[in-house]
Image: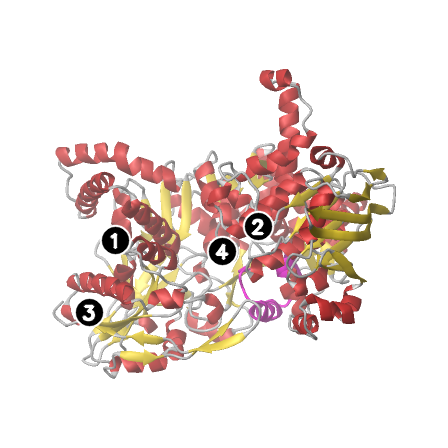
């Protein structure tokens, strides 16, 4: 049994139903509007999918949530706290973790070291305690290492523990990236195309992990993904963006038949419906 | 009728030992004894969360008690069958032992069996309980539920991913144990009472036989069969001590694994180590550094091919050193095998090679502490023997069948003639019938096939086990195996050829994964080859040959040239009638899921001949091309039909 099944890693039950509240978000780069007047809420234990054509502003939304970008207008509340002006590392410490569309790991470090780097936000020992090592430093190392091993078990990457990340296949690297995000013990997980470029088997694995995180751990997640089958199967709710605006939001079934979505998504009639039906 | 040669070996057993054995005549009794005798010594070690977790003998017994109580609580009766599916884990052993403690039968299934076959076997075995390691196995059982009316409960070890499974037949392993502890708290003597009822002649296991010719059969083996097997083996192979380490990474369903990690474990009391995952087995093996190993030929072939590829990858200087060292090793082994003395200068060179080449190589393979390595299942080609023994590994051949609880012959130390299968173990007789069939008799000869009296009648006659293998007795007393009687090829002119000899030679390169030689009733021999995707892939990359898939790579002209060279080299070592005159490189690897191999990776010749009949006919019709039709099932369920064009390569008879 791994720790995910007995809820050890939930990192505390949120007191509020709305985990993340985004209001009237506006983001511009010079004259280019990336996100325009976007509002949505993410509830406890919910898996929200964001879909839309390339350049619709999906990744920009995630970047606003974790603090990479500063929106020109709008507010973001996380666990009843206004985080709009907070720097990224503070938000990470609050429990917002993410994975990246293009893998952003340390290629020359091992899998263990990469995942351990996700534990940095939880490391408490002083330089002196770490230098002496015995006593407090050692206890802390063991504690973190234990968490990392739980994640290694969860993601089934035992065979790659000591391999350098840069030498691993792409699908494994994606797993390691998810592992590092989980090592932060997040209260909100942002997944930016976690399945892009994966084989069918790897996608199935990743879908299993995401479902397990939601079902067993109740971890709220926002998922950006191009594979319609994945989004419609996994997500509780789907938000559709086009040119930085929200054009629809609702249950997967509603989205599949939404006329605006079908029209706007691929710029032609029936495009989405066909893609969804053809999965 | 000429008198068959009889070889009898006196058992080293004393009367006291016999009496002692009679008393501890079942595995659960042995376990009770061992828990007392070994107490807090380590019985199992399992790697979990990156750490080797230890389980003592006392804990082993406690787990078994809890499982047995749980099975009782779920309604298990004496004689019931418990099927076990999963990778080797302590839990599998607890349940097998618990079933036997209640007078039941444990039946291991290969974990990679497809759902349909699994259902067929479980149903045929009349199993009332099935143990599944994880979701993968549970899904197979539940998908086939309609065909498994006799299965009442499915015990699941790892519940991971099954948060929405509410099937009434499913029981968690932890629940089972909790039920058992509850029952035994009310009735503490129940476990001992049940164990005391057990008799040595009770059936302990159903063991799947690796039938290469037909569907698998279930051999019934009693506690006495298995324990006697262990005792008689130890009597001639005193290599195993209680301080030893063993790594259990082969399927529990295989008699060889049962033999070591179940039977010998109870008899001797060494530590059985379980790897973390099948993918980490090689690493974990090296971490543990086991003292002995019993594995089928494919494991040694795999180790050899991995080593060879690494050497081919090394720089020219290292490669020279390696080649020179292997030449020395080969000469030493040949001299030893022929019984000739090894000259002092050769011994000195070998010693030099040991510290510079052989030992580091063994260390990489995790075999550096190994006192003895047994090869079982199919025989291993002489070239492999030369290789491993040259490195200083005490590799020996074992011969036997599932029906005789695994082992009837083994090489003796100092008498390893690798063209033989060794001499009979204690209390075991081996004869060769007039028509050349090897038959054997010992206390380990099985009780019969479950629900298959006809097959039982064929295999068991007057207490003798008819193996279906053809062989002769060497004057030294060793048995020499030709091949399965059914497999021997009779060419058109009547020449009889054991195909495996040639196949072993063809496979002795890292580039050939499987080879099948054929030619029954034909004027000459032909071969179907499977390239080794990884190694040939690497070979192609090094030469800048681009390829996409196995199918593509297998038909590259350069690859075919490589294979042709290999076949030519092999032919040069064979007498003219045994030479392979035509071969093709198959577009896919032989696979057990396609019934081309058994689960222990032996060729199912008849099935292969049937499946590729057109191809074989084309080879003998003198064609140089063959258009195959292959239906491929993709991961997402789509089915497509492909028409790869295979080139048939031919070799002249004189080379």
- Give the distance between the C-alpha atoms of the residues marked 2 and 1, in whole angstroms: 41 Å
Judge whether A226 appears above or below A155 on screen.
Answer: below
State whether residue B160 appears in this view.
no
Q: Nearer the viewer, mark 3 or mark 4?
A: 3
Report the residue at 30% width, 82% height from top. B617
- Give the distance between the C-alpha atoms of the residues marked 4 and 1, in whole angstroms: 34 Å
- Give the distance between the C-alpha atoms of the residues marked 1 and 3, in whole angstroms: 18 Å
Q: Are marks 2 and 3 in contact (CB under 8 Å)?
A: no
Judge whether B430 appears above or below B34 on screen.
Answer: below
View extreme (front): residue: A31
Do discs 2 and 4 belong to a common subunit? yes
Q: Earlier in the sequence, mark 1 or mark 3?
A: 1
Q: Which secondary structure lies at badge 3?
A: helix
Residue beneath label 1, please? B383
On what subunit does the disc labeled 1 rest?
B
Mark identifier at residue B578 = 3
Q: Which secondary structure lies at badge 4?
A: helix
Q: Which secondary structure lies at badge 1?
A: helix
View extreme (bottom): residue: B621
Magenta part of the chain: B109-137
Residue beneath label 4, please? B225
Q: Are marks 2 and 4 in contact (CB under 8 Å)?
A: no
Q: Nearer the viewer, mark 2 or mark 3?
A: 3
- Give the distance between the C-alpha atoms of the residues marked 2 and 4, in whole angstroms: 10 Å
Say whether residue B131 is magenta.
Answer: yes
Q: Nearer the viewer, mark 2 or mark 1?
A: 1
Q: Earlier in the sequence, mark 2 or mark 3?
A: 2
């Amino acid at each position: 049994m791994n720790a995910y099944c007995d809820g050890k890693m939930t990192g505390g039950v949120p007191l509020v139903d709305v985990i993340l509240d985004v209001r009237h978000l506006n983001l511009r780069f010079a004259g280019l509007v990336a996100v325009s007047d976007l509002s949505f809420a993410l509830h406890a234990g919910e898996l929200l999918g964001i879909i839309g054509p390339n350049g619709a502003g999906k990744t920009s939304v995630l970047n606003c949530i974790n603090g990479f970008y500063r929106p020109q207008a709008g507010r973001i509340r996380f666990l009843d706290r206004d985080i709009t002006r907070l720097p990224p590392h503070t938000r990470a410490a609050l429990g917002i973790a993410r994975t990246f569309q293009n893998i952003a790991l340390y290629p020359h470090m091992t899998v263990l070291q990469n995942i351990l780097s996700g534990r940095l936000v939880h490391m408490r020992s002083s330089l002196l305690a770490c230098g002496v090592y015995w006593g407090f430093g050692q206890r802390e190392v063991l504690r973190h290492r234990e968490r990392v091993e739980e994640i290694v078990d969860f993601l089934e990457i035992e065979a790659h523990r000591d391999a350098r990340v840069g030498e691993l296949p792409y699908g494994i690297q994606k797993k390691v990236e998810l592992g590092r995000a989980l090592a932060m013990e997040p209260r909100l997980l942002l997944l930016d195309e976690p399945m892009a470029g994966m084989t069918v088997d790897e996608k199935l694995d990743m879908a299993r992990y995401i479902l397990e995180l939601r079902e067993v751990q109740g971890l709220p997640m926002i998922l950006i993904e191009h594979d319609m089958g994945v989004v419609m199967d996994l997500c509780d709710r789907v938000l559709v963006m086009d040119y930085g605006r929200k054009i629809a939001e609702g249950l997967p079934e509603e989205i599949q038949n939404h006329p605006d979505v079908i029209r706007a998504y691929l710029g032609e009639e029936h495009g989405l419906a066909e893609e969804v039906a053809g999965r | 009728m000429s008198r068959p040669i009889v070889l009898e070996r006196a058992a080293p057993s004393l009367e006291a030992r016999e009496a002692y054995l009679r008393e501890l005549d079942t595995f659960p009794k042995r376990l009770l004894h061992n828990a007392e005798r070994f107490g807090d010594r380590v019985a199992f070690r399992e790697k979990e969360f990156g750490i080797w977790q230890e389980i003592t003998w006392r804990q082993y017994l406690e787990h078994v008690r809890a499982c047995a109580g749980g099975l009782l609580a779920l309604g298990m009766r004496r004689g019931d069958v418990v099927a076990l599916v999963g990778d080797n884990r302590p839990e599998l052993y607890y349940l097998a032992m618990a079933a036997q403690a209640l007078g039941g039968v444990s039946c291991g299934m290969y974990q990679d069996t497809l759902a349909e076959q699994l259902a067929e076997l479980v149903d045929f075995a009349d199993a009332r309980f099935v143990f599944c390691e994880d979701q993968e196995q549970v899904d197979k059982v539940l998908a086939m539920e309609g065909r498994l009316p006799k299965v009442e409960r499915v015990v699941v070890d790892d519940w991971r991913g099954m948060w929405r499974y509410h099937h009434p037949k499913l029981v968690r392993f932890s629940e089972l144990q909790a039920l058992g502890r509850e029952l035994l708290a009310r009735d503490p003597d129940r476990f001992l009472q049940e164990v005391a009822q057990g008799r040595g002649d009770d059936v302990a296991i159903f063991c799947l036989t690796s039938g290469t010719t037909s569907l698998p059969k279930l051999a019934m083996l009693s506690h006495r069969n298995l324990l006697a097997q262990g005792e008689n083996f130890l009597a001639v192979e005193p290599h195993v001590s209680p301080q030893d380490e063993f790594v259990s990474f082969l399927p529990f369903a295989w008699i060889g694994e049962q033999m070591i990690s179940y039977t010998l474990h109870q008899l001797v009391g060494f530590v059985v180590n379980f790897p973390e995952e099948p993918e980490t087995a090689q690493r974990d093996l090296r971490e543990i550094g086991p003292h002995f190993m019993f594995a089928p030929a494919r494991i040694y072939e795999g180790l050899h091919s991995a080593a060879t590829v690494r050497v081919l990858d090394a720089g020219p200087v290292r490669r020279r050193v390696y080649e020179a060292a292997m030449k020395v090793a080969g000469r030493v082994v040949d001299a030893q095998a022929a019984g000739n003395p090894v000259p002092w200068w050769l011994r000195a060179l070998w010693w030099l090679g040991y510290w510079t080449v052989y030992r580091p190589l063994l260390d990489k393979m995790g075999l550096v502490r190994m006192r003895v390595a047994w090869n079982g299942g199919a025989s291993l080609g002489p070239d492999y023997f030369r290789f491993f023994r040259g490195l200083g590994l005490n590799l020996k051949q074992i011969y036997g069948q599932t029906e005789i609880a695994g082992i009837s012959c083994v090489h003796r130390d100092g008498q390893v003639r690798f063209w033989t299968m060794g001499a009979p173990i204690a209390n075991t007789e081996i004869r060769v019938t007039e028509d050349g069939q090897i038959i054997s008799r010992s206390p380990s000869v099985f009780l019969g096939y479950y629900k298959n009296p006809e097959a039982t009648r064929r295999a068991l006659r007057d207490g003798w086990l008819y193996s279906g293998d053809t062989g002769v007795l060497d004057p030294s007393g060793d048995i020499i195996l030709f091949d399965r009687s059914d497999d021997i090829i009779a060419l058109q002119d009547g020449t009889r050829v054991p195909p495996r000899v040639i196949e072993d030679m063809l496979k002795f390169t890292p580039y050939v994964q499987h080879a099948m030689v054929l030619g029954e009733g034909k004027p000459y021999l032909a071969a179907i080859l499977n390239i080794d995707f990884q190694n040939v892939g690497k070979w192609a990359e090094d030469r800048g040959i681009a390829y996409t898939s196995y199918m593509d790579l297998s038909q590259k002209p350069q690859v075919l040239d490589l294979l042709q060279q290999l076949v030519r080299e092999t032919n040069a070592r064979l007498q003219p009638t045994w030479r392979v005159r035509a071969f093709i490189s198959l577009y896919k690897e032989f696979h057990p899921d396609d019934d081309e191999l058994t689960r222990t990776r032996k060729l199912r010749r008849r099935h292969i001949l049937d499946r590729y009949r057109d191809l074989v006919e084309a080879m003998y019709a003198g064609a140089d091309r063959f258009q195959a039709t292959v239906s491929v099932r993709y991961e997402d369920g789509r089915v497509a039909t492909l028409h790869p064009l295979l080139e048939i390569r031919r070799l002249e008879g004189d080379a």
